[in-house]
Every structure is written in structure tokens, then in C-alpha cells.
Amino acid sequence: MDCERCREAVSAGLDGEAGARETAQADEHLGGCAACRSWADLAARVTRRVRTGPADPAPDLVTGLLGPDSTGLARPACGCAASCGCGCRQGLACRCTPQVA
């Protein structure tokens, strides 16, 4: 296997697309080619960094569930809305099912 095919096989392996034979041939080539080993190490670091990069911002669901509701009243721990008539806003046990918290 030449360097170009080895690097293609390494890339395919990092993407989970390489077959067993292709992987074995690439591993054999990597055993004797320092340039391709270096390339494979760098490719693995880049792939890992791209896949484990920071997540996109997400909405704050906690405040929406446990923060003040649309009437400005604090929500009880169960998450019931102000219009709920179960009595949890008056300190009684929540009778709603399923409970949010």
C-alpha cells in the first residue's frame, strides 16, 4: 500500500467506513512509514477535536420550568402552572400526574 492509499484508509477508518482488509493493510503500512504515522496521529487529533467541540447554545429549560410563570408567580417544585387547581401553590401536595419534578 502506498502513502496516498494508506491515508485514505486511515481517514475512512476515522469515519468508521474502512473494512477489515483495508485497515489491516493501512496498519501494516503505518508500521514502516513514519510520515504516515505522523499524518494519522494528526488526523485522529483533528477528528477528535471536531467531534468533541463545544456544543451549540441551548435554551435555558430550567428557568422555563421552575422560574416564574407568565403571571410572575414562582412555580412550585412540581412545575404546575398558575392555572393549575391542584392546590400545590397553596402548600398542598401536588395531585397532578405526571409530576414535572
Image: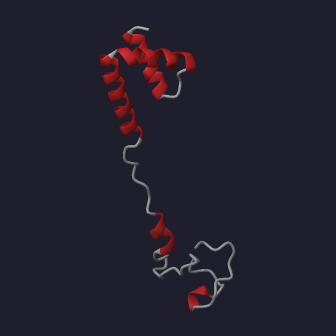
Q: How many marks?
A: 0
Left or right: 94, with 2 as reference point? right
Where 42 sits versus 28, above or below? below
Which quadrant of the figure contains the N terminus?
Answer: top left
Which quadrant of the figure contains the C terminus?
Answer: bottom right
Left or right: 42, with 82 as reference point? left
* Residue at the image point whose x is 56% and y is 20% from the top: 20
Where 59 sits versus 46, above or below? below
Where 5 sits versus 72, above or below? above
Q: Residue furthest front?
A: 31
Q: Tell me how the rendering is colored.
A: secondary structure
Left or right: 4, with 90 as reference point? left
Q: Position of residue 10 (x, y in %)?
A: 43, 22
* Residue at the image point whose x is 62% and y is 80% from the top: 84
Left or right: 21, with 41 as reference point? right
Residue 92 location, quadrant: bottom right
Q: Residue furthest top?
A: 2
Q: Position of residue 88 (x, y in %)?
A: 60, 86
Residue 40 versus residue 61: which sits nearer the camera?
40
Residue 87 versus residue 37: which sits nearer the camera?
37
* Residue at the image point whose x is 64% and y is 83% from the top: 94
Q: Position of residue 18 (x, y in %)?
A: 53, 21
Residue 8 versus residue 56: which sits nearer the camera?
8
* Residue at the image point whose x is 40% and y is 8% from the top: 2
Q: Position of residue 6 (x, y in %)?
A: 42, 15
